[in-house]
Image (cartoon, coloured by chain):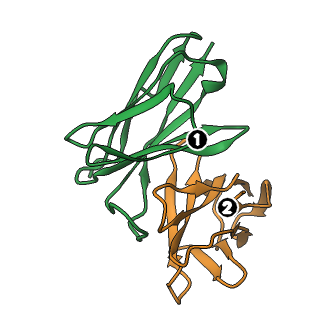
Chain colours: A orange, B green
Amino acid sequence: AQKITQTQPGMFVQEKEAVTLDCTYDTSDQSYGLFWYKQPSSGEMIFLIYQGSYDEQNATEGRYSLNFQKARKSANLVISASQLGDSAMYFCAMREASGYALNFGKGTSLLVTP
Amino acid sequence: KAGVTQTPRYLIKTRGQQVTLSCSPISGHRSVSWYQQTPGQGLQFLFEYFSETQRNKGNFPGRFSGRQFSNSRSEMNVSTLELGDSALYLCASSLAPQGVSVYGYTFGSGTRLTVV
């Protein structure tokens, strides 16, 4: 069964606007971590933000914030003030405490337009 | 601080050949994991090593193997290459040995393998 679901294959946003990328997850573990990565066309996976299942506050890293709704099993990424350089694939991933691997979603392609 | 280094960046191989990919983790990171990325299947976990021991393996045939050396560098090998093995192979290193933590994973730029 798919553990990470990203329902938006592609998104467009204008420069300087905010955008939300959706991610839902499925796990029976109580302890898990949620990650967002950015993958530009070069291929490298760039770590953006992390949220632990026991963290009470939503994670923030600069222009990135994670809207964590544990009961809904949702971990949406919010990018504020989009920049042209934000155009890339974005992946949501989860690691369960019982496992050693990251489970990735299919990704969302974000295009920032001038 | 050097990042995760993967070599080579690009490879073209013929069906039936074998290939070895290399990954040098961030200094001090003892956990190295490998992922295969294809347009159809997305990112799939191959295996993970910690202190030279394979701790977990994904759902891949035995043609895919790996190892980790005492300096934490890792190699993965694919024997008897098939066209479907064409993919971006990503290596990630982590400071945290187990459990869930904020350390997360740092990925390399990947090796793009094309099988013809």
Quarter holding the N terminus of chain A? bottom right
Q: Are marks 2 and 1 on the same chain?
A: no
Circles 2 and 1 in contact, beta carbons < 8 Å: no
Q: Position of residue A65 (x, y in %)?
A: 58, 76
Query: Is A57 left or right of A78, judged from the image as shown?
Result: left
Q: Nearer the viewer, residue B77 or A10?
A: B77
Q: Amino acid at mark 1?
A: Asn
- Identify the residue at horizontal 47%, vertical 68% (top origin): A97
Q: Position of residue B12 (x, y in %)?
A: 54, 16
Q: Is residue B71 above or below residue A46?
A: above
- Identify the residue at horizontal 33%, vertical 63% (top origin): B96
Query: Is A89 left or right of B24, judged from the image as shown?
Result: right
Q: Which mark is residue B59?
A: 1
Q: Which mark is residue A3?
A: 2
Where, by quadrant of the figure, is residue B24 drawn?
top left
Where, by quadrant of the figure, is residue A114 drawn?
bottom right
Where, by quadrant of the figure, is residue B94 drawn?
bottom left
Mark 2 nearby-residue class (10 Å; few <14, some 14–19, many ≥20): some
Q: Is residue B19 above or below residue A7?
A: above
- Identify the residue at horizontal 23%, vertical 54% (top origin): B28
Q: Which mark is residue B2?
A: none
Host chain of mark 1: B
Q: Amino acid at mark 2?
A: Lys
Of labels 2 and 1, the one closer to you: 1
Q: Position of residue B48 (x, y in %)?
A: 41, 47
Q: Is residue B5 above or below residue A67?
A: above
